[in-house]
Image: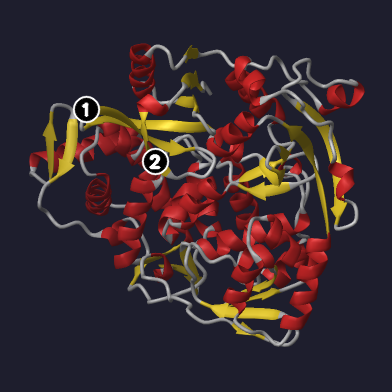
Amino acid sequence: MTDDRACEAILAAARLFGETDKSSFTDFFDKDTPQSVLLLIEKLSRNSSLIKNRGLIRPSGVMADMSALFNLREPEKMHSFSLGREYIKAVENIILSRRASLREAGTQRFLTTSAHREVFPAVRESLFIMTRAFLRKSDVFFVSDSTISLNRETEKSILLMDSLSLACSVLDCFGEEEHSLFLGDLISFFKRFSTDRKGLERLIKLLCIKYRMKTDPDDLVSEILNVNLLIEKERFFNLNLSYIEEPKVSENIICDSDFTVRYSGERSAEDKIYLFCDLRRFDTVIEYEVTKSSFFRGLDEGMSFSEIIEILGKPSFSRTIDSWQESYERIGVYKGYVLQCTPLLSAVIQTVPELSRYVVRKITDTVFLMSTEKYEMWSQKLAQAMDVGALPKTVEESLNSEKTVKSPKVALKDYKSLYSSGEKSVLRLSEDNSSFEKALSSIPGHASSGMDYRAKLSLIRDALKKENSILLMEMPDKTIIAKPIDTRRQQGNDYLMIRNIVDGKDDLIKISTVYSVKSVEITL
């Protein structure tokens, strides 16, 4: 390379670097001697092509010839698969349909190479592996020993991302740095140019130096191609415009008599076709199939029968779905802990998100089937909140112990429960004959009888200052468990605005009608 051509290459690199130091240039042009690169930088500084300031170098207004660094062509407008929400849903569907534990995700293959090629003909198999790892690291799934379900709150935040944000997030989980600025520069370059493999490798190396990225540039090239951000044609790479354009919105689906559901484009983040169907093919047209097991899976994930029918419209196979619904209601198989509790505990479990998210089924008002997922965590939170003492640490401990908990307020057992219309008795547990008043006495807190109005009012006002306080109020004809909202004085009387924990309704109570009140602080 002549000195003039080398100077053009340095100016082109300077344009892409922006303001940087000399080491960026010597690292980038590592095949040339550092001395020659530094001499050329000095030469360009003397003729004002580069500006030096406090050890940093930046380009002046002189135009740079990018062809000195890259073999360039005019970019072509190309569209292909992009990593959008429909692909995320498809990967989740594959994982959910196989009910495989993500603890084995590092060694277990959810799809063979041939099966992947059949289901995802336009997607690299390596992207499936990357996306699965991203979902695992993002805690999208609740995983137990034998089952797996979605963490809908986390999943929703992912499904609301656009394609470029999703690609950036997937790349982020494989390195120690963020890729947003890196991808921004990469896209800006390919909006203007198309280059070959050598040019792509050179560009990614430059951007890695610019953003001080620790990821190996060669690995980044592979990852960029895995997410299909660039499309190769005749040995030149072009930007996949699907990543920067608004996706085609799919408003209609087609339901065929063979139980297939087909659509093209992108559906809303709230769409749940992937929850009650099995993926058959992910291509320009996305094809799912409704099966009995997938229908049951959708119901297990919290969908209602009417919700599924609303999505499908009135398919030709609606009679079959009706029969599946009847079958689902007749029998259900679950694995979990059966938790029997007092009305107070029941209200807390249903109100506190850290506990309610682990409820698999509410069997009666005071009996719940709790998930085996993160058992030690939620059981200790429950014990801490209600002061019932330590609960068994493992499934085996609870199975091997005749009485699972010393406190009579909570009975916790491990069950692989099977129930049907004729076998409800399987879930019968010993009745808790203690009175509600006795249940309240086991909870640490502060009580005030109706005889001391000032103490009662002071306790209520103190509870209002604490975010996690719940009031237990004895009225002449009932007991109320409620979250205090505020107090007010009207026509010489003190009133308390509450939110009833049992039914969720707001109510205004005249404090003088409360016989006794107890404040309980739920600490999780």
Q: Is residue 79 visible?
A: yes
Which residue occupies the foreground of this view, 167 or 346? 346
Q: Which mark is residue 507?
A: 2
Residue at the image position 57 percent from the left and 81 percent from the top:
253
Crowdedness near tag 1: few (<14), some (14–19) or many (≥20) residues, C-alpha within 10 Å: few
Residue at the image position 36 percent from the left and 15 percent from the top:
453
Please give the count of numbered marks on the rendered protein.
Answer: 2
In the picture, measured across the screen, residue 240 lies left or right of residue 279, that is left
Q: Position of residue 126 (x, y in %)?
A: 64, 55
Q: Residue 186's image quarter?
A: bottom left
Q: Is residue 199 visible?
A: no
Residue at the image position 37 percent from the left and 47 percent from the top:
180
Q: Secondary structure at mark 1?
A: loop
Crowdedness near tag 2: few (<14), some (14–19) or many (≥20) residues, C-alpha within 10 Å: some
Which residue occupies the foreground of this view, 374 or 48? 374
Residue at the image position 38 percent from the left and 76 percent from the top:
76
Image vertical order of residue 44 relative to residue 221, above or below: above
- Front: mark 2 or 1: 1
Q: Position of residue 107 (x, y in %)?
A: 77, 44
Q: Which mark is residue 379?
A: none
Which residue occupies the foreground of this view, 166 or 36? 166
Q: Amino acid at mark 1?
A: Gly
The residue that mark 1 highlights is 492
Image vertical order of residue 166 relative to residue 25, above or below: below
Q: Secondary structure at mark 2?
A: strand
Cα separation, mark 2 vs mark 1, equals 19 Å
Q: Earlier in the sequence, mark 2 or mark 1?
A: 1
Which residue occupies the foreground of this view, 387 or 89? 387
Q: Amino acid at mark 2?
A: Asp
Q: Position of residue 329 (x, y in %)?
A: 78, 62
Q: Position of residue 319 (x, y in %)?
A: 76, 82
Q: Residue 71's image quarter?
A: bottom left
